[in-house]
Amino acid sequence: MKFHVLTLFPEMICQGLGTGVIGRALNKNLIALHAVNIRDYTLEKHGKVDDYPYGGGAGMLIQAQPVYDAHRAVCGGRPVRTVYVTPQGRPFDQRLARELAREEELVLLCGHYEGIDERVLEEVVTDRVSIGDYILTGGELAAMVIIDAVARLVPGVLGNETSAQEESFDNDLLEYPQYTRPEVWRDKAVPQVLLSGDHNRIAGWRLEQSLQRTRSVRPQLYERYRQRQSLAKRLSREKRSNIHMMESLARGLGEILYENGDTAAVYLPESRICMACAADGAGGRAILDRMPREAELVVVHQEGLKQLLEETGFQALFSCRQFLYTQRKTLPVRHKDIRLLGMESFAYLCARYEMDGPEYVRERLTSGAVYGAFVEGELAGFIGTHREGSMGMLYVDEAYRRQGLAASLEAYLVNRTLERGFTPYVQVKPDNLPSLQLQEKLGFYQAGPLYWWMERHS
Ligand code: ADE
């Protein structure tokens, strides 16, 4: 991924990002940083880039022309996502970081003085982003914050295979306190429970500490956590049927749209998917009333809700069966050479996985969600986690079939999913016999109903 920063202080950007994890990623060419001095593009004498605001007021503004020309020089007419960092922007958070990390290139525009002439912002900027409700002297620190948070999501930057994919921002809870040696420091002892070796007790203590901290420091975050927990508990009464909704909540991908008794809807803003179940027609209508206009797909598993959606502008795209892996123990993986795939495998995947199109493949690869099986150094098949959390995209090249590669790929992804503390699940089309058999072989449970993926058509 390449970051271009348009700034009056390029050296500040290069120095600020040149060390630590990001510096290492730059040296390894996992990411690239291109700091551009806006002043180099002024047509005025003495490098002047600013002027007084029309209508009066304190301070100076950066003029449109040098910003426009610097942007043109960087993008050369290509449509590159361009973020203007400003206190007037959309708040930056982990979700936006994940979204930006899917871009191949990103321009960050840093303001100074009182800001930038609005006309050039209208021409070149796609997003206005603030890093918090306070005013900095310029946009450089904000741009560096964004680059740091986005770059660490680029596969390989954190230096481990598991990658930062699907980090849930810790389920809305703040981190618990941590301790290292010595056991006693200035008469303060490490909490006894951490020395007990009892992993369940330690996990319980940590959760309690996180809850206390969050409740006192971030009451709104705590409330959101509580609501999620309460819905998760209710959904767990029919865990097999509801695992798709439970997992989207647990992985921080979905937010609660509606909840009332046995009626519930979860919305995944990044993928524009809504997952819903309704006790009756009134519940279904309550969900429809709250469904965002931009929701493109709805996943349902009740005939009545499916019909209601069909009457209100949706049509069924396909149906599938749902299977989940309820055990905690990892599965044996016979095939040894399975690795995380990156964009170098884009063409290979596009030629074999056509269902969701090349943009989807790019997004999954850059999110670190796809693993490949290699035979004598050659890619022979792959599997991935879909953006809403289910495992899928499974494919093995004809020449390598009937050797257990599919089972190894799926077992491998089950193990990675368990490592992250999630429940592996898959959705399989009813006519895909080999896949149905594979789920049984690996010890998955089938959930009762059929699941319909409904698409908005009006
Ligand atoms: N520029 C100045 N203050 C800022 C902030 N809080 N966020 C983003 N850009 C800024």
Image: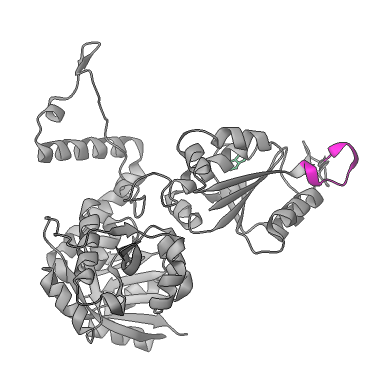
Q: Is residue 441 magenta?
A: no
Where is residue 260? Give x, y as percent: 24, 66
Q: Is residue 42 magenta?
A: yes
Q: Residue at x 25, y 52 (%)?
A: 420
Nearer the observer, 106 or 193: 106
The single residue placed furthest to the front in the displayed view is: 376
Q: Quadrant of residue 138?
A: top right
Where is residue 379? Give x, y as percent: 35, 67
- Please report the bounds of the magenta region as a residue range: 39-48
Q: Name the image colouring.
A: one colour
Where is residue 97? Give x, y as percent: 47, 51
Nearer the observer, 131 or 413: 413
Q: Is residue 269 visible?
A: no
Q: Residue at x 12, y 29 (%)?
A: 193
Q: Residue at x 33, y 55 (%)?
A: 252
Q: Residue at x 32, y 66 (%)?
A: 384
Ligand 1 is in which quadrant of the figure? Answer: top right
Q: Is residue 271 above or below residue 432?
A: above
Q: Is residue 413 visible?
A: yes
* Left/right of residue 383 with respect to residue 348 in the rendered view: left
Q: Quadrant of residue 245?
A: bottom left
The image shows a total of numbered marks equal to 0
* Left/right of residue 247 with respect to residue 80 in the rendered view: left
Tell me the chief SS of the magenta region.
helix
The single residue placed furthest to the right in the displayed view is: 45
Q: Is residue 440 above or below residue 18?
A: below
Where is residue 129? Give x, y as percent: 57, 50
